[in-house]
Amino acid sequence: GLGSTGGGAIHNSGSATIIASALRDNEAQRGGAIYNDTGAQLTVLNSEISGNTSTFAGGGIYNRGDATLVGTTLHGNVGGTVFQSEGGGIAQIDGTLSLVNTTLTGNRASGPGGGLALNASFVGGSVTVANAIIAGNYSAAGSDDIQSGAFVQIAYQGTNVFADSMLGDTEDRTGFSVAEIFATSAQIDRDGDPFSPGTFLAGALANNGASG
C-alpha cells in the first residue's frame, strides 16, 4: 500500500493487534508499514514486516504510542529514502516499545539507527529488549543497529544478540556473527513465505540463548 503521510499498510490511532501476518512492500512518509499514533496500543505477534520504505523516519514502524512485538521479524525495510532520516526498522519517537523474541536485521536508514532509532528528544517513555536479535543493519550516518538518544534508557532482559559488543550487558551474546544473521535474511527472501521455519530462525536463536 501507499500511505501519503503515515502508515503504508496501517495507521493505528486506537488499538490494533496483528497476528501471523506479513506486511510487505508498503510506502509512506513515516512508518512504511505501520504508524502507531500517540496514545495508541499496538501488538504484533509472529509476523513479518519486510521491504517497506519511508520518506522520513521508520521504514518498518514509526511509533509514538505503546507497541509490543513478539516473535516478529523486521527485515529489508528502508528509512529515509529521500531525506536523511532515522530508524530503518523502527523509529521510536515517544511512548513505550517492547521487543520480545524479535529480530531486526538487514534494515537500512539514511540517518541514525539502521535497525532501531530512539529519537534524541525521546524522554519519559520506556524501551524493553528481551531475547531479541538486532544485528546486520546499516546506517549511512550513525549507529548501524541501535541509535539511542542521550535521555533514553533501554531495559535488557533475557539473552539478546547484538553485532555491537558495546550494547547490552555481560549476559548478552554480543559480537554475534553478522554473516549468520544475513544468512537468515537470505532465507527469508528465498522462501517468500513469512511462516516458514527460515523466517523465524533468528528469533529462535535468541529464544534458545535465553533458555541456555
Image: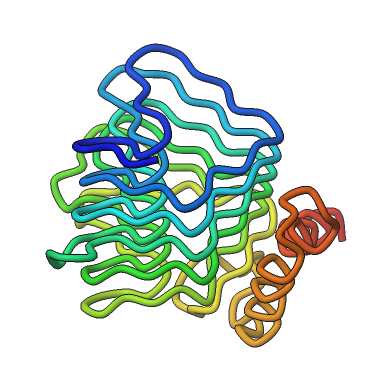
Quadrant for the C terminus, please: bottom right
Closer-to-camera residue (4/124): 4
Classify residue 125 as left or right of residue 80: right
Where residue 60 appears, x then y in whole percent?
A: 41, 50
Q: Quadrant of residue 61?
A: top left
Q: Residue at x 54, y 43 (%)?
A: 23
Quadrant for the N terminus, please: top left
Closer-to-camera residue (129/84): 84
Q: Quadrant of residue 47?
A: top right
Q: Residue at x 66, y 65 (%)?
A: 171
Toward the front, the furthest residue is 1
Where residue 48 appears, x then y in whole percent?
A: 62, 48
Where residue 8 appears, x then y in whole percent?
A: 35, 39
Closer-to-camera residue (91/21): 21
Classify residue 180 as left or right of residue 54: right
Toward the top, the furthest residue is 14
Classify residue 141 as left or right of residue 115: left
Q: Residue at x 23, y 65 (%)?
A: 81
